[in-house]
Image (tube, grey):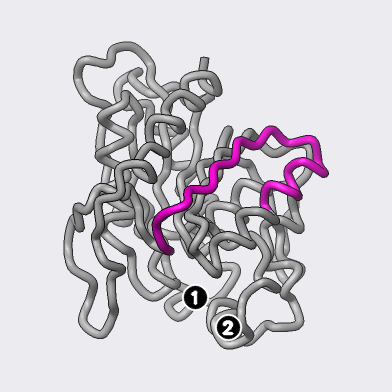
């Protein structure tokens, strides 16, 4: 299964004042595997570019379009594609990470943990990103109601563990920055489980829980970056300054990780 990755990626280069080879991040927006939320896609990509990171907004395929392992295969191919494109020597191919929100965090987490589904036929272990930034992610699908899990796995409820990134985390995974609001029923237990699994495996993880906010808040700056497709709903775009401080915390963490 081969995807035309170049047609699924929007490149947002690092701001021009940042010179030399810069790190890169592939951005996986949320949207319940039904749409790509613009504030979690291009919004995040432009923020990353503003702090000197080349951003690659990835419009990954949904399981309804390409059954599993299709979305994960596409994610692996996107990682290889980014590492093969050095932007005229402006990209440090040894420092390529992922950012994922909600469902996008689920897919980014599977990629980061090196997950291999039992019905895949791989000759070698897949490559992994060098670091991960995961916002109110899905780390263990057993923590979700059955209905969304049946949808996201295309009916493979018996493979819940295989579709849970936290179940694949091992010492070979790159460092993780994870955050979510306290009042986020799916995000909070999943983010805590992600941190627990990282600690158990000896993987570096920085975790932040914010007292205000909700699932899908993105940058928490109140900017929408676009509308949801017909029939879908976006969360309210609210500016919450304290929650928005996750970006500064992440920037400092990222500076240490790519140093």
Could you say where residue 183 lies in the image, as x and y percent from the top left?
A: 49, 63
Towards the viewer: 199 or 6? 199
- Mark 1 vs 2: CB contact within 8 A: yes
Could you say where residue 236 lies in the image, as x and y percent from the top left?
A: 26, 66
- The residue at the point 70 percent across, 73 percent down is 142
Within 10 Å of disc 1 (Cα), the crowding (few <14, some 14-19, many 20+) is some
Residue tagged 2: 154
Residue tagged 1: 63
The magenta stretch spans residue 143: no
Q: In this view, does 253 lie to the left or right of 11?
A: right
Q: Can residue 6 be seen in this view?
A: no
- The residue at the point 38 percent across, 75 percent down is 34
Towards the viewer: 46 or 21? 46
- The residue at the point 62 percent across, 41 percent down is 128
Q: What element carries label 2?
A: loop
Within 10 Å of disc 2 (Cα), the crowding (few <14, some 14-19, many 20+) is few
Could you say where residue 197 lies in the image, as x and y percent from the top left?
A: 75, 49
Q: In this view, does 37 lie to the left or right of 84?
A: left
- On screen, residue 146 above or below 162: below
- On screen, residue 249 above or below 100: above
Towards the viewer: 209 or 199? 209
């Amino acid at each position: 299964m081969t995807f035309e990755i170049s047609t699924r990626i929007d490149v947002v280069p690092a701001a021009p004042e940042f010179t030399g080879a810069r790190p890169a991040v592939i951005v996986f927006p949320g949207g319940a595997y039904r749409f790509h939320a613009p504030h979690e896609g291009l919004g995040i990509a432009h923020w990353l570019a503003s702090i000197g990171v080349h951003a690659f907004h990835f419009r990954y395929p949904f399981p309804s379009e390409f059954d599993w392992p299709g979305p994960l295969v596409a994610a692996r191919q996107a990682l290889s594609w980014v590492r093969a494109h050095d932007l005229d020597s402006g990209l440090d191919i040894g420092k390529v990470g992922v950012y994922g929100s909600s469902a996008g965090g689920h897919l980014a987490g599977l990629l980061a943990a090196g997950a291999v589904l039992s019905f895949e036929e791989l000759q070698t272990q897949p490559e992994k990103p060098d670091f991960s930034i995961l916002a109110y992610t899905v780390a263990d699908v057993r923590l979700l109601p059955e209905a969304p899990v049946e949808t996201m796995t295309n009916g493979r409820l018996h493979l819940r563990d295989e579709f849970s990134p936290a179940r694949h985390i091992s010492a070979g995974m790159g460092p993780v920055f994870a955050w979510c609001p306290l009042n986020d029923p799916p995000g909070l237990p999943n983010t805590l489980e992600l941190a627990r699994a990282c600690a158990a495996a000896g993987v570096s993880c920085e975790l932040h829980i914010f007292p205000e906010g909700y699932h899908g808040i993105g940058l928490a700056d109140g900017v929408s970056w676009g509308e949801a497709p017909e029939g879908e709903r976006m969360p309210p775009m609210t500016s919450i300054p304290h929650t928005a401080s996750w970006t500064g915390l992440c920037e400092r963490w990222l500076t240490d990780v790519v140093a």
